[in-house]
Image (cartoon, rainbow, N blue to C red):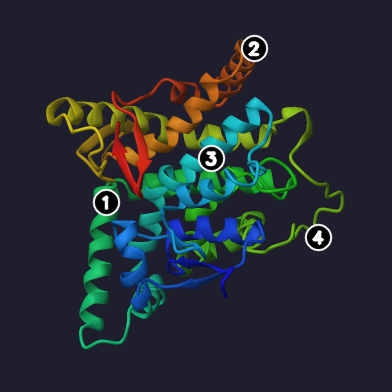
């Protein structure tokens, strides 16, 4: 077992699904343990700093916390073969990574926690069995679940917004299903970084929880197959009789995928703008030291979507990931930048290139910190 990595996570964890899929698809030998194992406290937590998942323990004893950092650890060592070479595809791949790990959290939390008659027994099983057998196991399970239900509410899901959240999700699901009628992955015939990011909510919440899982199976079978495909080591595309290899040629981004982005932009762009304003105000008022931890949740932001006011917590982590999209763009030649701008304008995403915080965020010693 000396060459085996250990992934600490739980089956129903949104963020763990992203890292797990990457390890599977890239042929990296690993075992998975829950945070209830004593080794998490003894070997992982002292280096991870925070008790969050996923966390990776390398064969050499190093710990890498957070899915983005885990993927970057391997990508930096293998020539970044999960990142397309073309400028348009690079931007789309990086953008879907942000969308999956942050932009779809509101519907993901809604569909898990607001349909308890269908979901509760399934969810409780997973929370309960992620912990060791102790006299307080039941109490800890209930406390964890209540905390997550509270998180769902602070992301802007309530009685007034529920119907809108569902309508937007179903439109997105329909558009994504149409894309997967043509290709098994986002950018063709193999997964890109964006596939792993998008899988995070699509597997753990939308694809496994009973209520949204049934919706996906019945209304978006192609999406459900992609979720399965992303957890298998081979290409797993027998239904595509003209299946090829690699990313699409000539830096092509299919119109079907741009249509997905167009649906997502309606929610993602105004929330990103509102969150940037709220966080920048917080930065001005608090002036955190360089190297201070950038908390995952800060003050509230408000925006209007289809005439409905939504109040949600603002998250610096969204901008930590968005920095990668913007850095890719800023490093491009002027001709490539123009091509990217035109593509994003056609799907309502052009503003994301300019929405920035007044301070950057970087990862240092397993923490996201202010620069």
Across and down, in percent, residue 224 comes to 61, 59
Which mark is drawn over residue 335?
2
Which label is found at residue 158? 1
Which one is nearer the viewer's eye here, 163 or 178? Answer: 178
Q: Secondary structure at mark 1?
A: loop
| Mark 1 vs 3: CB contact within 8 A | no
Distance from the alpha carbon under mark 1 to that under mark 4 = 41 Å
Relative image position of residue 84 (x, y in whole percent): 67, 36
Tell me which residue sits at (77%, 57%) in the image.
237
Which one is in front, 316 or 35?
35
Task: Point out which mark residue 96 bears.
Answer: 3
Work out how far the residue at label 3 is from the one at label 2, CA to CA, in angstroms: 23 Å
Q: Which mark is residue 238?
A: 4
Q: Is residue 95 visible?
A: yes
Q: Is label 2 in a helix, a strand or a loop? A: helix
Q: Residue at x 23, y 58 (%)?
A: 150
Question: Is the residue 167 above or below the residue 120 in the image?
Answer: above
Q: Is residue 258 above or below residue 185?
A: above
């Amino acid at each position: 077992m000396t060459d085996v990595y250990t992934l600490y996570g739980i089956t129903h964890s949104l963020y763990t699904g992203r890292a797990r899929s990457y390890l599977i698809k890239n042929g990296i030998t690993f075992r998975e343990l829950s945070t209830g194992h004593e080794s998490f406290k003894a070997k992982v937590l002292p280096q991870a700093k925070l008790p969050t998942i996923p966390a990776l323990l390398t064969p050499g004893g190093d710990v890498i916390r957070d899915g983005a950092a885990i993927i970057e650890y391997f990508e930096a060592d293998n020539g970044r073969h999960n990142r397309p070479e073309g400028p348009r595809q690079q931007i789309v791949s990086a953008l879907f990574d942000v969308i999956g790990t942050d932009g779809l959290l509101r519907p993901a939390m809604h569909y898990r926690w607001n349909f308890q008659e269908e979901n509760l027994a399934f969810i409780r099983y997973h929370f309960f069995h992620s912990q060791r057998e102790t006299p307080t196991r039941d109490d800890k399970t209930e406390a964890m679940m209540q905390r997550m239900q509270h998180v769902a509410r602070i992301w802007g899901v309530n009685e007034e917004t529920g119907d809108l959240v569902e309508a937007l999700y179903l439109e997105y699901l329909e558009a994504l299903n149409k894309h997967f009628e043509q290709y098994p992955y986002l950018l063709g015939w193999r997964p890109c970084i964006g596939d792993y990011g998008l899988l995070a909510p699509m597997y753990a919440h939308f694809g496994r929880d009973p209520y949204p899982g049934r919706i996906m199976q019945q209304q978006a079978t192609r999406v459900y197959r992609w979720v399965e495909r992303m957890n298998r080591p081979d290409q797993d595309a027998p239904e595509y009789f003209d299946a090829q290899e690699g990313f699409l040629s000539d830096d092509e981004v299919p119109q079907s995928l741009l249509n997905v982005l167009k649906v997502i932009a309606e929610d993602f762009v105004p929330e990103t703008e509102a969150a940037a304003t709220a966080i920048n105000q917080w930065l001005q008022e608090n002036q955190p030291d360089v190297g201070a931890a950038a908390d995952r949740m800060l003050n509230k932001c408000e925006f209007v979507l289809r005439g409905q006011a939504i109040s949600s917590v603002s998250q610096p982590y969204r901008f930590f990931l968005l920095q990668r999209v913007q850095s890719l763009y800023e490093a491009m030649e002027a001709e490539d930048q123009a091509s990217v701008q035109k593509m994003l304008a056609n799907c309502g995403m052009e503003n994301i290139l300019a929405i920035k915080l007044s301070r950057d965020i970087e990862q240092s010693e397993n923490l996201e910190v202010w620069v």
